[in-house]
Image (spheres, rainbow, N blue to C red):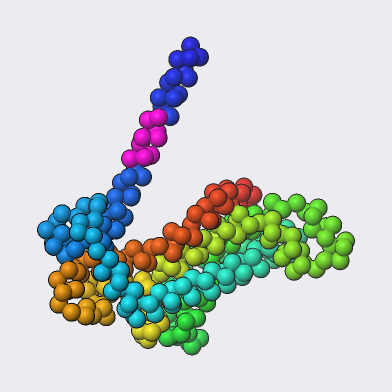
Amino acid sequence: MAVMQTKGEKAFSIFNYLILGGFALLCLFPFLHVIAQSLSSQRAIVSGEVIFLPIETTFLAYKEVFMDQHFLRAFGVSVARTVVGTFINVFLTCLMAYPLSKTYIKGRGIILFMVVFTMLFSGGMIPTYLVVRETGLLNTFWAYIIPTAISAFNLIIVKNFFQSVPAELEESAKMDGASNIGILFKIVIPLSMPVIATIGLFHAVFHWNSFFDAVLYINDRSLYPLQVYLRELIQFDQSEINLRDNFEQQLLANESLKAAALISSTIPILIVYPFLQKYFVKGVMLGSVKG
C-alpha cells in the first residue's frame, strides 16, 4: 500500500512539474519571439518567417538603438531614477517602520491607521497633480521620486519584519550606550536584509517600469525615462533613430528596431533579479508573520 502511495505521489509530482513547465514556456515564448525579431532581417519579419529563432541574423537593430542619443539619454534617466528612487524608498521606509514596530510608542495606532487608510483610499490623479505643481516639482527629476517616496504596503511588510527581531538584542545594545539610530543601522537593518532586498526589488521594478508619472508631470523631453521612449516608439512609431543609408534601410525593419529597444530595456532588471531572488520569498513570508 505504501509503495502504491509513493508511486502515486511521484506521478502527481511529475504531472505538477509538467503543468508548471508548460506555463513557464507559455510565458517565455513571447520573450523569445521578440528576441528573434530583434535579430532578424526585414524580409524575414515581413514574410512572417520569424517565430522563435532568428532568420538571417543581423545585429543592425541593436547597433542603431545603442547609437541613438535619445535612447541613451532615456536609459540614463531610468537608471538614475531607479537607483536614487530605490535608495530613498528603502531608507525612508526603514526610518518610519522601526518606530512603528515598537508597541510602546504613543500614537502608533493612529499613525498605522492613517497608513492603511492610504492603501484603501487615495486622493486621485488631479489632486496629486495639483500637489506636485504647487510644490514646484513639475518638469524636475524629483517628480519621479518624492510623490512615491513611501509605499504603505512595503512599510507594513518592513514593520512586521522588524517586530520579529529579538528585543534582547536591542536591550543589550542600549546597555552598551547605543542610540536608537545606532540600533537601527547596526543591528536591526543587518538582520533584516531579506526584507530590505525584497522591498528594494519591488521599488526598483516600479521605478524602472513607470511611465505614467512622466507623461503627467514632465514636458521636458530630456527628462523622459526609457519607458516613455518605448511608448512613443511602439504606440506612435515615433523614433529619433535615423538609418544612415539605403542599404541599412533595406536590411532593417521597424519591428526589428522596436524589438531591440524592448530587449535592451529588459536586460538590466533581468541582471539584477537573480541576485535578489534568494531573499525574495523569505522576506515576504517573514514580514507577514506578525501583525
Q: Residue furthest top?
A: 1
Q: Nearer the viewer, residue 40 or 113?
A: 40
Identity of the residue drawn at 81% across and 53% down: 168
Q: Position of residue 211 (x, y in %)?
A: 38, 72
Q: Quadrant of residue 230?
A: bottom left
Q: Is residue 139 above or below residue 82?
A: below
Instruction: Please determine whether, in this image, residue 135 is positioned above or below residue 237.
Output: below
Query: Residue 134, relative to residue 101: is it above or below?
Result: below
Q: Position of residue 223 (x, y in %)?
A: 41, 82
Is residue 24 toward the left or the right of residue 238 in the image?
A: right
**Residue closer to the observer: 41 or 116:** 41
Residue 18 is inside the magenta segment: yes
Magenta region, main secondary structure? helix
Q: Is residue 147 at least partly visible in the picture?
A: no
Q: Nearer the viewer, residue 240 or 289?
A: 240
Q: Which residues are magenta?
A: 14-22
Q: Position of residue 82 (x, y in %)?
A: 49, 70
Which of 140/21 is in front?
21
Q: Residue at x 19, y 73 (%)?
A: 248
Determine the residue positioned at 36% across, 35% down. 18
